[in-house]
Image (tube, grey):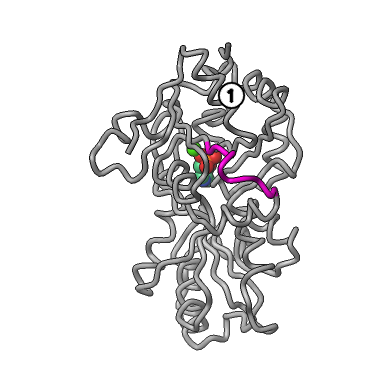
């Protein structure tokens, strides 16, 4: 395999790199910003790419926010964007459930473990759901809950899907509902399976760690709908109709972003060193995915010839 090409400081190589693609798919956290801090020069870099006629699409695994909220965040950080420019794992999940999953009419409801972003995107696709941010599930489990969940009297008979995203209020009661819908045959989906969540220069539990109790208790693995799932790539392609050979995925994580681009047979993948994984991670012999290009930071692309 050819080793990744380092672009930082090499004007001619940067120019050739930009000319090679029509569409850039950008991971968000770790590439454009960290938390609420936009990296220096990123808005100018996006604007330079657009002025060279490139399409820029923002592809995030963060399911806690809807596309509308991402548009607000991008715009506040001086990266003007519209809903059509954003593709998130909550939206990807909603599209999969509403347009691809073939469920019987009386089993079309979703039990959500997750935050408001998932609920908003399900609603935008007309998908009915229970659970999620429902305050009634934010408490300790009681003997009556055990009884009612086991005998089914507390379960919604129309639930045919359990969708798991990052939930900051995860507890035994929600997991008990999730388990029993799955035991009754519900389809098991995950918005994304990032094991960790980068916050304050450290790592916390990501969506992929929150759903582990359900996978463990059922012996089943969810179908994941965020990066690196090709279900997400197909959904993005269905919407934007890009030429894969002239599309580049830009990201900081090897097992989500770079693998997403490699598995999707995109023309290229660009790794930035401003997020979770570093150069030494893809240099390892057993690296899960290796990028085709890398820069120290995204704004290094501004210095094209
Ligand atoms: N999931 C959650 C809940 C997050 O907050 C984040 C980053 O903010 C991510 C996933 C990873 O997002 P991205 O794919 O943009 O790096
Ligand atoms: Ca990222």
Q: Quadrant of residue 209?
A: bottom left
Residue 121 vs 217, above or below: the answer is: above
Can I make out residue 242 in this image? Answer: yes
Query: Could you say which is closer to the camera, residue 174 or residue 265?
Result: 265
Range shown magenta: 240-249
To which residue does mark 1 refer?
38
Q: Residue at x 63, y 37 (%)?
A: 23
- Furthest residue in direction bottom, as rendered: 151
Q: Position of residue 92 (x, y in %)?
A: 62, 56
Q: Position of residue 19 (x, y in %)?
A: 60, 26
Q: What secondary structure is found at the residue carrying circle 1?
A: strand
Q: Is residue 292 left or right of residue 225?
A: left
Q: Is residue 86 left or right of residue 278?
A: right
Q: Residue at x 46, y 67 (%)?
A: 175
Q: Is residue 304 magenta?
A: no
Query: Could you say which is closer to the camera, residue 251 or residue 117?
Result: 251
Quick one: quadrant of the N terminus? Answer: top left
**How many marks can you see?**
1
Q: Residues within 10 Å of mark 1 (few under 14, many from 20)?
A: many
């Amino acid at each position: 395999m050819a080793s990744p090409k380092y672009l930082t400081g090499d004007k001619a190589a940067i120019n050739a790199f930009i000319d090679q693609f029509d569409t850039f798919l950008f991971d968000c956290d770790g590439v454009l910003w960290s938390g609420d801090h936009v990296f220096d020069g990123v808005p100018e870099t996006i604007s330079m790419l657009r002025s060279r006629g490139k399409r820029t699409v923002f592809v995030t695994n963060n399911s806690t926010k809807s596309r509308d909220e991402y548009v607000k965040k991008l715009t506040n950080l001086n990266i003007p964007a519209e809903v059509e420019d954003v593709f998130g794992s909550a939206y990807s999940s909603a599209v999969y459930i509403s347009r691809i999953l073939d469920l019987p009419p009386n089993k079309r409801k979703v039990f959500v473990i997750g935050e408001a972003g998932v609920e908003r995107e399900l609603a935008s696709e007309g998908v009915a759901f229970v659970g999620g941010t429902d305050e009634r599930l934010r408490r300790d489990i009681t003997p009556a809950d055990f009884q009612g969940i086991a005998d089914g009297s507390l379960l919604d008979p129309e639930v045919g899907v359990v969708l798991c995203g990052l939930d900051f209020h995860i507890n035994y009661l929600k997991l008990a509902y999730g388990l029993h819908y799955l035991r009754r045959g519900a389809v098991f989906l995950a918005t994304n399976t990032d094991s960790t969540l980068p916050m304050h220069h450290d790592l916390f539990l990501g969506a992929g760690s929150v759903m582990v109790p359900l996978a463990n208790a059922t012996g089943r693995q969810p179908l994941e709908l965020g990066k690196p799932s090709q279900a997400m790539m197909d959904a993005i392609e269905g919407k934007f109709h890009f030429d894969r050979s002239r599309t580049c995925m830009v990201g900081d994580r090897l097992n989500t972003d770079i693998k997403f681009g490699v598995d999707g047979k995109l023309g290229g993948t660009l790794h930035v060193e401003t997020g979770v994984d570093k150069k030494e991670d893809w240099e390892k012999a057993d690296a899960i995915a290796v990028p085709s290009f890398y820069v120290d930071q995204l704004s290094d692309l501004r210095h094209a010839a």
